[in-house]
Amino acid sequence: MTTARLQGASTWEEGLFEAFQSHAEQEHQLLDTYRALADDLSSPDVSFLVRLILEDEERHHRLFEELAGTLRAQIELEPEPTTIPDVPLHRKDPSALIDVTDHLLALEREDSKKLRELRKQLRPVEETTVWSLIIETMELDTKKHIALLKHIRKLAKGID
């Protein structure tokens, strides 16, 4: 894949931009394959599961395009706001952000425990349904949510 050079970009920025674009292109090819598999209605269970993957892959594709666009806008000093914002130097009322983040972290951790317990309850049907697998993917999403919230808390604590 060839890309036009970015005006004023450092070697590192050029490499990063190329990596973002390359990954977006790879994601695009992956999406086509997933869509074809999801459209195969001869196996509704597989189609259902592949659609769950497809949702994630579509988001990944969009994020890589947004990363490339944001980097380009920063390098070229575009006046419009970028899709993926920078961390602000100052934030209004970081203590309120910390409080709500702590509350959400507690809820996500409790949700994680409940999902783990629910998956144990589903053991008798894990060979005949996809229910346990769906709960397992929700557990993974919850871990992701906790990681994001921890980062938000870290950002809020580091401000002023």
Image (cartoon, helix red, strand yellow):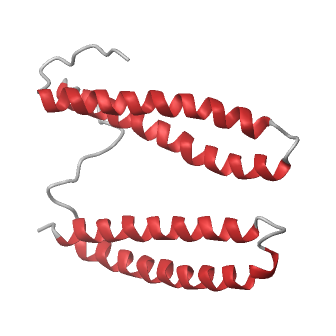
Residue 79, visible in the rendered structure: no
Which percent across, then down, holds residue 127?
Answer: 80, 70
Image quadrant where one finds the N terminus: top left
Which percent across, then down, holds residue 83?
Answer: 36, 38
Q: Nearer the viewer, residue 115 or 96?
A: 115
Which percent across, then down, holds residue 27?
Answer: 50, 34
Which percent across, then down, holds residue 66?
Answer: 39, 35
Q: Residue at x 77, y 49 (%)?
A: 46
Q: Residue at x 77, y 72 (%)?
A: 126
Q: Nearer the viewer, residue 118 or 154?
A: 118
Direction from residue 118 to residue 39 in the image, left or right: right
Q: Residue at x 15, y 59 (%)?
A: 90
Q: Nearer the viewer, residue 150 or 18?
A: 18
Direction from residue 37 to residue 98 in the image, left or right: left
The quadrant holding residue 119 is bottom right
Q: Residue at x 42, y 78 (%)?
A: 105
Direction from residue 52 to residue 93 in the image, left or right: left
Image quadrant where one finds the C terminus: bottom left
| Residue that sits furthest to the right in the current view | 42
Direction from residue 120 to residue 76 in the image, left or right: left
* Tally of numbered discs: 0
- Identify whether 14 is placed above or below 125: above
